[in-house]
Image (tube, coloured by chain):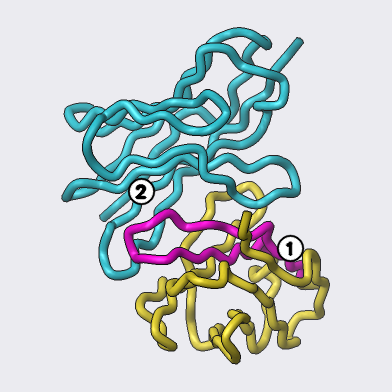
Chain colours: A yellow, B cyan
C-alpha cells in the first residue's frame, strides 16, 4: 500500500540554524500539507500546497517557514532560523483531491536546543 | 471559527469492554469529519471518515462513529476493546474547501488494562 514517507525521523539542531524536513507524498497525489504537534498539544495545520503554490497557510507559518516541491516526488519544509518553540513533531500529509482523505507520514521529531 | 473538542483527555478501559470516545465540533456548514489514531512513535492513521450519507460510519479495526448534527457530535465507538487499541485518538474536522485543512481536537489517550 502506498504511503507517505518522511526524513529524517529525528533531528536535533541549534537555535538559529536552518533545517529542511523532507517528505515524499503518495505518488499520484496532488495536494500536500504540513502539520505540527508540539509535545502534549494538538496537531496544528501549518500549510497546504497545490499546483506548485501555497493554497493556505496558518498564522504559525510566518516568514521563517517555506515549502517547496523541488522535483516530482519530494515536498520540503524549511525553517530558516529555528527557535526553541519550533521543537515539535512535524507531519507531512497528502491527498489526491481536496476533499479526499489525507494520508499522513510518520513524522519528523525536531528538537531545537 | 472551526473547532473540535475532545472532552476526555485520558480514558482507561478493561480489555473486552465497550468504548466510546467523545468528539464535538463547531462548524458553520456540513463538516467533513475524521477519526485518526496515533500509536506511540507512529504517524496518524485514518480510522474512519464522514462526508455525507449514512450517519453511522464503519471504519477499520472494528471502530464505528455516528454523526449527530443536532448535537454537533461525532463519537467513536467500539463494542469490545483489544489491548492493541491502546493509543491516542484524534477527532478532526475538514472544511471541504479548496484546501480541506484539518482542524484537530486535543486527542484522547486510551489505556487498556487486562
Is residue A91 on the magenta stretch?
yes
- In the structure shown, which secondary structural element does the residue marked by tag 1 occupy? strand
For disc 2, the neighbor class at 10 Å (few under 14, some 14 to 19, many from 20) is: many
Q: Which quarter of the figure is the N terminus of chain B placed in?
A: bottom left
Q: Which mark is residue A34?
A: none
Q: Which mark is residue B93?
A: 2
Q: Which quarter of the figure is the C terminus of chain B placed in?
A: top right
Side of A52 where A112 appears, left or right: right
Locate residue A37: give its quadrant.
bottom right
Q: Is residue A34 above or below residue A38?
A: below
Locate residue A1: give its quadrant.
bottom right
Q: Looking at the image, which is closer to me, B54 or B25? A: B54
The answer to whether residue A1 is visible is yes
Q: What's the residue at 59%, 49% (across, down)?
A: B44
Q: Looking at the image, which is closer to me, A94 or A55? A: A94
Q: What's the residue at 36%, 65% (across, down)?
A: A97
Q: Chain of mark 1?
A: A
x, y (%) of residue A66? 54, 86
Identify the residue position indicated by label 1 in the image: A109
x, y (%) of residue B17? 59, 8
Q: Which residues are magenta?
A: A88-111
Q: Chain of mark 2?
A: B
x, y (%) of residue A70? 59, 91
Q: What's the residue at 68%, 11% (across, down)?
A: B15
Q: Is residue A12 above or below residue B41?
A: below
For disc 1, the neighbor class at 10 Å (few under 14, some 14 to 19, many from 20) is: many
- In the structure shown, which secondary structural element does the residue marked by tag 2 occupy? strand
The answer to whether residue A59 is visible is no
Side of B87 where B9 appears, left or right: left
Is residue B104 on the magenta stretch?
no
Amino acid at each position: 500500500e502506498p504511503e507517505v514517507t518522511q526524513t529524517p525521523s529525528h533531528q536535533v539542531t541549534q537555535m538559529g540554524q536552518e533545517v529542511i524536513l523532507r517528505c515524499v507524498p503518495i505518488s499520484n497525489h496532488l495536494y500536500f500539507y504540513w502539520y505540527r504537534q508540539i509535545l502534549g498539544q494538538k496537531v496544528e495545520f501549518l500549510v497546504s500546497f497545490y499546483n506548485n503554490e501555497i493554497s493556505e497557510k496558518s498564522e504559525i507559518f510566518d516568514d521563517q517557514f517555506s515549502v517547496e516541491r523541488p522535483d516530482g516526488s519530494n515536498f520540503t519544509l524549511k525553517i530558516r532560523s529555528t527557535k526553541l518553540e519550533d521543537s515539535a513533531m512535524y507531519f507531512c500529509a497528502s491527498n489526491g483531491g481536496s476533499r479526499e482523505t489525507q494520508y499522513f507520514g510518520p513524522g519528523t521529531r525536531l528538537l531545537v536546543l | 471559527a472551526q473547532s473540535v473538542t475532545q472532552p476526555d483527555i485520558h480514558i482507561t478501559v478493561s480489555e473486552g469492554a465497550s468504548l466510546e470516545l467523545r468528539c464535538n465540533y463547531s462548524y458553520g456548514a456540513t463538516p467533513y469529519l475524521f477519526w485518526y489514531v496515533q500509536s506511540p512513535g507512529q504517524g496518524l492513521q485514518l480510522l474512519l471518515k464522514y462526508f455525507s450519507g449514512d450517519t453511522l460510519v464503519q471504519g477499520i479495526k472494528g471502530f464505528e462513529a455516528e454523526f449527530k448534527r443536532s448535537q454537533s457530535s461525532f463519537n467513536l465507538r467500539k463494542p469490545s476493546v483489544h489491548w492493541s487499541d491502546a493509543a491516542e485518538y484524534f477527532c478532526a474536522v475538514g472544511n471541504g474547501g479548496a484546501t480541506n485543512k484539518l482542524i484537530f481536537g486535543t486527542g484522547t489517550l486510551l489505556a487498556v488494562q487486562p
